[in-house]
Amino acid sequence: MRLSLDEYMLIRKNLNRISDFGKFQIPRGILHAILMQKKVESVKRKYHLFSGRTKEILEFWEEKKRLPEWLTLTPVLKVRLLLKGMQFTTKEINKSLRDPTKLDGELSKLVYEAVSRDFIYSPIAAKLQGVLGKIGERIIEEKLKSLGIKFKTEKELRMQKTPDFYFEEPLDLFGNKLKWIESKALFADLRTYNLYFRKQISKYKELFGDGLVVYWRGSLAGLPVSDGCEFDGKLKRKLLEMTLTASMDEEADGEPLKLAEKFVGEYIDNDLFPYNAEVVRILGNMGFKILIREE
């Protein structure tokens, strides 16, 4: 899907949290990408304002057992700064985020809730971004194989700064003569497009010639990228619809954060999982639409 600049700016202005998705007649995956990119830009602007105030954050926590209102970061970044103020090492912080139950009392609850709500910087969110990226690459791979096109992947080229798919000879494909294809599970706004053009795409063009960049979760109208319209199928719908089904036929037992991360990791091949009320809440916080299948 391509959005005009006016459409995009209106969505971006009024999209502040996952619960805002219902305000728009836009595929959920596109809204998820726009919101995520908006929040990341905000963090980049503000993080340095808070990173040197870990002592204040710790003192506020010790006095009130909550985090200060002026600490306007995402939930996981807030608790990272608190744990840093407590002299946790980076390794210890990462371990605490993966298993908050190892922490004591109120701190354990705080970290658990942060991890269960942060759709950008939690381990579950990181897993989701990796899975969405793999889905985009698999769509292209399956399409090329169905057309009988031979290609080399980024791993096979064993070079730095290489595209996801490379062709030995230029191919007439999707109305263009291409030497490579790059897959991005993102929305191509101006900032994102310029960032990746500068970091990657300009170098690919210089080294290999013309190629195609696919932004699976939409783009601004007028940008010289694909919005994925050349592709279709169930995997593409997974990128755009972000729908999971919880089956009441059986109930999932286990630690909810680990279960949520497991189900996200399996999303590329499976979108049905055993019901668990807390896992449903967590996956909803990550941006999924959850359907409940009754027995």
Image (spheres, rainbow, N blue to C red):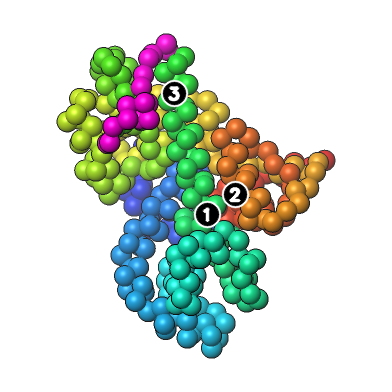
Q: Which residues are magenta?
A: 147-161
Residue at image location 69% in from the left, 42% down from the top:
273
The relative height of residue 145 versus residue 87 in the rendered view (above or below) is above
Q: Earlier in the sequence, mark 2 or mark 3?
A: 3
Q: Is residue 155 magenta?
A: yes
Asked if marks 3 and 1 touch (Cβ < 8 Å), the reply is no
Q: Name the main secondary structure of what is drawn in magenta.
A: loop
Residue at image location 45% in from the left, 68% down from the top:
89
- Which residue is the site of mark 3? 141
Q: Is residue 267 left or right of residue 33?
A: right
Q: Can residue 175 be seen in this snapshot? A: no
Label number found at residue 261: 2
Q: Nearer the viewer, residue 21 or 168?
A: 168
Q: Can residue 163 be seen in this snapshot? A: yes
Q: CA distance from mark 2 to mark 1?
A: 8 Å
SS class, disc 2: helix
Asked if marks 2 and 1 touch (Cβ < 8 Å), the reply is yes
Label number found at residue 123: 1
Residue at image location 41% in from the left, 82% down from the top:
55
Q: Is residue 203 left or right of residue 281?
A: left
Q: Quadrant of the N terminus?
A: top left
Q: Earlier in the sequence, mark 2 or mark 1?
A: 1
SS class, disc 1: helix
- Please name the amino acid that badge 3 sits on: Glu
Label number found at residue 286: none
The relative height of residue 61 versus residue 269 in the rendered view (above or below) is below
Residue 239: x and y in percent read: 50, 37
Residue 91: x and y in percent read: 48, 62
The relative height of residue 41 versus residue 160 in the rendered view (above or below) is below
Q: Earlier in the sequence, mark 3 or mark 1?
A: 1
- Please name the amino acid that badge 2 sits on: Glu
- Please name the amino acid that badge 1 sits on: Pro
